[in-house]
Image (spheres, grey):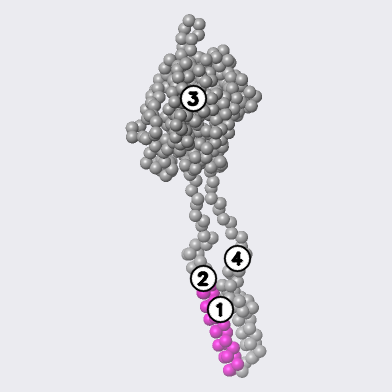
């Protein structure tokens, strides 16, 4: 990342981008954090996770704001740094319009993390000051030229007056002398730009006023990222206020970031979702595939159809737990989830890490404890 981008990002984030991101999440979740039932609801959610009863977690609307307040902060930070770390991901946020489809992203972690990365990829456009149509130097030159021409005209007229007087004095061809005086005076006035008693400056200025002036329009950032957040329950009450806060705090207008939602069970793979996949430059599965693999047959069919529908050159980002939650039992053997994905023939591995940590920097403040995350990362490209 170059110094200019870093400087522009600092104008938005201040001394700490990580703390700024946490403040955005906190502002979005302040009502949930103030709920008297928050602690009890969170314990219920954790119990359902332990039992891998994901429907019980997400199909209760009362759980959703509590889930976001608890799990969105650390993940948003992780995704933010992930996009900055990998050029292939950052490239989707710059250089031209792009579509990003995030599967299972209702809680808003992708929205906050990717939007924060956009601040680096697309600095805030500066409004250029309007340039004057003529410089002070040019105006001075014009004025000097006008004065000189006027002076020359007066001197020429005085010379002709003297000649006329001499002709009259000598008594030689008085009529010719007067005609010469008239012709000389007219010529001098024309050279000085005087017509009908108007000054040279008035004529030139009138001409300038009639000349159309072309003003350069300030360059605008025409780049747009369309972020589609898909989930199988309706997270609109969470995402809409969060989106407004993100736009305000990170200076991302609709001309730069377009947000849409898609509600439905991804395992059903509707025609609408297939169309979005076919138009996507990047598809993300972040901390969602291990939930989907509770139904191994349908999830493998889903992955195969997603890969088939992806346009050539598009990328897929898969992030999930590096622990036993990502284990898949096939027959008598147990595999990590990414091992099955790695063998899909139409995907090329661009980046892989079987186990890495995202550790929250010290000194950050948030109403709840921030969790470090051990996860695997895969970035694939469609061949």
Mark 3 surroundings: few (<14), some (14-19) or many (≥20) residues within 10 A? many
Q: Hey, which residue is sitting farthest top in the picture?
A: 332
Rendered location of residue 103, percent (x, y): 54, 25
Residue that appears at 52% across and 16% down: 293
Q: Residue under circle 1?
A: 153
Q: Label 2's element?
A: helix
Tell me how far mark 4 sits from mark 2, CA to CA.
Answer: 16 Å
Is 28 drawn above or below residue 328 in the view shown? below
Which tag is nearer the camera, tag 2 or tag 1? Answer: 2
Q: Do residues under tags 2 and 1 come within 8 Å of each other at their CB atoms? A: no
Q: Residue under circle 2?
A: 143
Mark 2 surroundings: few (<14), some (14-19) or many (≥20) residues within 10 A? some
Which tag is nearer the camera, tag 1 or tag 3? Answer: 3
Q: Is residue 287 magenta?
A: no
Q: Which mark is residue 286?
A: 3
* Near-viewer residue (61 or 232): 61
Query: What is the chief secondary structure element of the magenta stretch?
Result: helix
Residue that appears at 57% across and 91% down: 166
Query: Which residue range is magenta in the image?
Result: 146-170
Which tag is nearer the camera, tag 3 or tag 4? Answer: 3
Is 316 drawn above or below residue 364 in the view shown? above
Tell me how far mark 1 sits from mark 3, CA to CA.
Answer: 83 Å
Q: Residue under circle 4?
A: 209
Tell which circle, 2 or 3, labels the residue nearer the N-terminal end. 2
Residue that appears at 43% across and 15% down: 324
Tell me how far mark 1 sits from mark 4, CA to CA.
Answer: 25 Å
Tell which circle, 2 or 1, labels the residue nearer the N-terminal end. 2
Tell which circle, 3 or 4, labels the residue nearer the N-terminal end. 4
Mark 1 surroundings: few (<14), some (14-19) or many (≥20) residues within 10 A? many
Quadrant where the C terminus sits is top right
């Amino acid at each position: 990342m170059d110094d200019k981008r870093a400087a522009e990002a600092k104008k938005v984030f201040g001394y700490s981008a990580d703390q700024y991101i946490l403040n955005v999440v906190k502002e979005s979740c302040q009502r949930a954090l103030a709920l008297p039932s928050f602690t009890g609801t969170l314990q219920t959610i954790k119990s359902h996770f332990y039992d891998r009863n994901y429907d019980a977690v997400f199909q209760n609307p009362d759980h959703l704001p509590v889930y976001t307040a608890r799990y969105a902060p650390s993940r948003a930070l992780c995704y933010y740094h992930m996009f900055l770390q990998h050029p292939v991901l950052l490239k989707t946020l710059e250089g031209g319009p792009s579509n990003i489809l995030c599967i299972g992203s209702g809680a808003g972690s992708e929205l906050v993390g990717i939007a924060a990365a956009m601040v680096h990829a697309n600095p805030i456009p500066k409004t250029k000051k309007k340039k004057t149509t003529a410089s002070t130097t040019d105006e001075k030159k014009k004025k000097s030229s006008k004065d000189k021409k006027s002076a020359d005209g007066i001197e020429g007229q005085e010379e002709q007056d003297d000649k006329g007087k001499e002709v009259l004095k000598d008594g030689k061809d008085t009529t010719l002398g007067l005609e010469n005086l008239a012709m000389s005076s007219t010529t001098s006035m024309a050279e000085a730009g005087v017509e009908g008693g108007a000054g040279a400056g008035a004529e030139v200025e009138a001409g300038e006023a009639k000349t159309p002036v072309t003003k350069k329009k300030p360059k605008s950032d025409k780049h747009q990222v369309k972020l589609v957040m898909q989930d199988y329950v309706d997270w609109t009450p969470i995402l809409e206020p969060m989106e407004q806060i993100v736009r305000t705090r990170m200076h991302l207008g609709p001309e730069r970031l377009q947000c849409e939602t898609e509600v439905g069970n991804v395992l059903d793979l509707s025609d609408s979702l297939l169309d979005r996949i076919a138009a996507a430059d990047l598809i993300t599965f972040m901390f969602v595939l291990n939930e989907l693999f509770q139904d191994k047959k349908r999830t493998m069919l889903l992955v195969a159809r997603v890969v088939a529908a992806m346009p050539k050159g598009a990328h897929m980002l898969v992030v999930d737990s590096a622990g036993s939650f990502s284990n898949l039992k096939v027959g008598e053997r147990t595999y990590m989830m990414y091992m099955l994905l790695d063998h899909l023939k139409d995907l090329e591995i661009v980046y892989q890490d079987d186990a890495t940590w995202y550790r929250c920097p010290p000194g950050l403040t948030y109403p709840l404890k921030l969790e470090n995350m051990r996860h695997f990362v895969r970035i694939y490209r469609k061949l």
